[in-house]
Image (cartoon, helix red, strand yellow):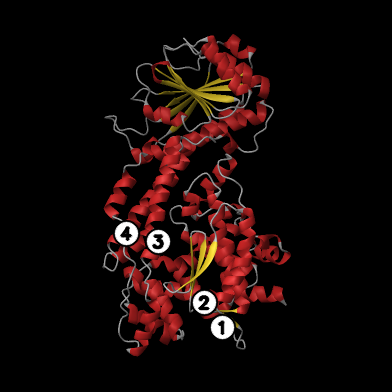
Amino acid sequence: MLSKAFIASVCRSMERGKSINRRLPKGGKLVIDKPLPYVCVYRYTDQADPYLSGLLKTQGAYIIAHAELDIEHLLYQLSATAAHKFHAFMLLELWLAPEDEIDTFKIYSPADRSPATIKALKQGFDEIEALYTPLQVAIFNTIDRHPPGMSPLLSLEKSKEVGTLQIGIEVPLIYKDEKGNLYALLYRKVRRKIGQVLKKAAYEFIRVQTSNTFEHYLVLGKTQLTQLVRSVDKQLAEVSEKMNFLLRVSPVNQTVEFENFKKHNYAKEPEFNYRLISLDPEEEKRKLFNLQLENIEDPTLAFLFRDKRNELEKQLMMLEERESASFLPLSNSLYGTLGKELIGAAHEILLDVEDDYSEQQELLGPQEFKALAETELSLYHQQFPDVVLGVEVRKDISGIMVSKGKLLIAEDFSVEASRAKALIQHEVGTHILTYCNGKHQPFKLFYAGLAGYDPLQEGLAVLSEYLVGGLTASRLKILAIRVVAVDALCEGADFIETYRLLTQNYNYPEKAAFNICTRVHRGGGLTKDAAYLKGLLQLMNYLRQGGAIEPLYGGKFAATHIPYVKELMHRRVLRAPFLPSFLTGKAAKARLASVREGLPVTKLISHENSIHH
């Protein structure tokens, strides 16, 4: 029996808007993440089923209690406290169906009460049929809305006193086989889906029956981060940052090897040197698979962490296979194959986009470009004073690259003055800004990078070049020629064959072609460079469909993660990002509107010129 003092303490916390996380006798648990006008309940007779418990743990308010524990007075007082704030309250009780009934969700509800809530439950459970067939949903209008053999959570009289609606849901064991073995992959999908269904049903109840203060059903989700979540995020980020994957697969002697390449009449493969790998991939993989992701209650975070762990495992395997024949297949697995659409778009750009013919322009060297970058970085120093930012000119890299919060510039780097602003927005206004925004999120992975973040990051960076009026034909063609080079690599071309393809078939200058070949063939064949055009096409399609650009600056994540990121922002787990200043300009808004209206990628340049003139 729960003491009056315990119940009073819980209700006081709810009145004050505090989160509640209390243990109950015989292995039970009471969690209320924030004041909500509903709670999900599961009562068990022997031991709590961990998988049904997992369904409830997706919610912001739940009670898992032994059937012998009298929780009626607790529920009565919680209902009264919540009803005082919201003017109504709902109890959703879930229980397992008998083992031989595996194809029907059963909803037990009062007749003609909250039809919108019941409709949301039915529609949501109907959609699970896409994951598991055959599946049915049955609705029973009855006063018996509790598990067989148990008493109601609240009597009808007490429910009416505190304005509480009770709904019962019998859940079929669709995620286990006839011997009780778990279909783990199916369960993960079902858990996420049922979690959404319960929140949507609760939102419909709130919208119709209460003083609605929630603008979206996702706001009902959890906001509190468990110690396990913080620990897993920290360990994944540590492995990622310690590995510093791109630096370890990039050659350190590219400049010297280009001179040797010329000396041998472009006919002898360069001999690249790489940084030593100062970690043990086997040890790092062991760390990854010691992480107890299956115990993370939040399905959204569990998915993001599992996705990152899979990526890190592949990157560690690539470090082990650096400069071997196994490197390229692993790269294809990590970055994905090109696909006909991407290859077709690359050839279309190379064919249809006219070259830039202009007089010789002023070139900026590394120190001049560094000064411009530092001016842009000063804006972010003010907004993110706790983040280490900087610009370095170095001799051990090619071109320019971003590492964490630093822009690294090769000592032989140069760029046309007219391209400097666009390039700074690419590197500083996108890569460093998303790093800074990620630093201010509660997860380290949002600055270290979630799995597969490269295409969206690079697509956003290239789009920023267009939005500031600096995306030139030659720049767009570089993105396309990289896809051609990656395609040649995947088709079996070696370094010299790829180089001849670029110089002879596409008339690329010697050094530019060498640099592209180096990027593509580094480590044994790195297909990452196709991500720039791939990401740009994905992003343009997202914007055409009405997607918001602002959340994309919230950190480093993939296009497939956008719904999860938006969910976490609705739940107030993630913070709204600081945005680059150019987004508010009239010209950038006009260009962005053109993309939303369906501007083809081949017309980015000509459209920019029409706006400019």
State the residue position of label 3. 335
Query: Disc 4 or 1, which lies upstream in sequence?
Result: 4
Left or right, residue 90 beside residue 286: right
Nearer the observer: mark 3 or 4; the answer is 4
Mark 2 residue type: Lys
Relative to 9, residue 371 above or below = below
Q: Position of residue 309 (x, y in %)?
A: 37, 49
Query: Disc 1 or 3, which lies upstream in sequence?
Result: 3
Query: Disc 4 or 2, which lies upstream in sequence?
Result: 4
Q: CA distance from mark 3 to mark 2?
A: 21 Å
> Foreground residue, 608 or 341?
608
Left or right, residue 172 beside residue 122: left
Relative to 37, residue 416 above or below = below
Left or right, residue 484 beside residue 374: left
Query: Disc 3 or 2, which lies upstream in sequence?
Result: 3
Q: Position of residue 379 (x, y in %)?
A: 64, 60
Q: Are marks 4 and 2 in contact (CB under 8 Å)?
A: no
Q: Are marks 3 and 2 in contact (CB under 8 Å)?
A: no
Q: Position of residue 416 (x, y in %)?
A: 58, 80
Q: Which numbered disc covers residue 355?
A: 1
Q: CA distance from mark 1 to mark 3?
A: 29 Å
Q: Which numbered disc covers residue 477?
A: 2
Relative to 246, residue 55 above or below = above
Q: CA distance from mark 2 to mark 1?
A: 9 Å
